[in-house]
Image (spheres, rainbow, N blue to C red):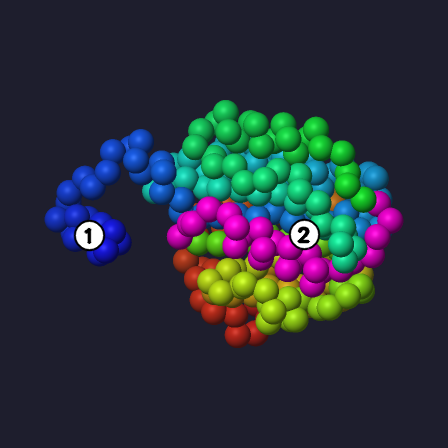
Amino acid sequence: MRRWWAGIAMALGLGLTSPALAQDHCRLALVLALDVSSSVDAEEYILQRDGLAAALGDPLIRAAILEGNGHVSVAIYEWSGRRQSAMVSNWVALHDDAAIDGLIDRLMSAPRSHTRFPTAMGYALGYGATLLARGPECDRSVIDVSGDGENNDGFPPRLAYKNFPFANVTVNGLAVLGGSDDVLDYFHREVRYGFGAFVETSEGYAGYREAMTRKLFRELNDMILSARPVTGPQPG
């Protein structure tokens, strides 16, 4: 009923809500999943963490977060082995610059959760889906998963998609190239999932900041070029 009335109001040019009330509407629930498996060394971890922090603080990304119709809610976790997914920041509604700064501070101050476990991507995706299921109700739900290798521990992503609550969830990948020759193909074939899903690439962890900035910009703006079902390999 609310959406029906909102559509009529927009058609008539009516202002349905005040700016303050509009901020209570969540347009995007975004889960950011960072790879801390044993293939990611200390220097690469810092490049990944700092790259995400810099991307969140980028002026274009701040504008994309704050200028949309409704707010963005974000949660961040690290993943590696089967039972080693760990929260970095629980859900936070990014209503203003202070909220974005607070999220960046939590990211930068959190210690790395694990260093020696394998790559259990299916478990990591299941963790992300569960996090979304108990998170805020938003128009769109996206998991943004980074990784530099293929699943090598536990069930694969396809079983996560079959057995966890992924209805109306999009999974986008950020494939870090250089460690595995097949990682990009694997992300296209096995990881991306749902309507409009895509894969961004980073040339090693040195390119992570730029890749994450591109990826967030595309996700936050719900770019039309990505708004199609996944039917086969697409360029990252």
Quarter the N terminus occupies: bottom left
Residue 117 in view, yes or no: yes
What's the CA distance linking mark 1 and mark 2? 39 Å
The answer to which quarter of the image holds residue 172 is: bottom right
Image side of residue 172 versus residue 2, left or right: right
Q: Position of residue 42 (x, y in %)?
A: 83, 39
Whether 154 is among the magenta residues is no
Callout 2 secondary element: strand
Frontmost residue, 69 versus 217 = 69
> Most extreme residue toward the left, as rendered?
12
Callout count: 2
Q: Which residues lie in the magenta part?
A: 115-139
Frontmost residue, 139 versus 223 = 139
Number of other residues with Cα within 10 Å of mark 2, as a class: few under 14, some 14 to 19, many 20 or more? many
| Residue named by callout 2 | 146
Q: Which mark is residue 81?
A: none
Q: Position of residue 14 (x, y in %)?
A: 15, 43
Which of pointers 1 and 2 lies earlier in the amino acid sequence? 1
Q: Amino acid at mark 1?
A: Trp
Q: Which mark is residue 5?
A: 1
Picture residue at 54% right of the left edge, 63% below the top: 165
Q: Position of residue 97 (x, y in %)?
A: 48, 27
Q: Amino acid at mark 2?
A: Ser
- Of marks 1 and 2, the one in the foreground: 1
Picture residue at 76% right of the left edge, 58% below the top: 82
Quarter the C terminus occupies: bottom right
Whether 121 is among the magenta residues is yes
Residue 203 in view, yes or no: no
Image side of residue 182 versus residue 107, left or right: right
Picture residue at 71% right of the left edge, 33% below the top: 110
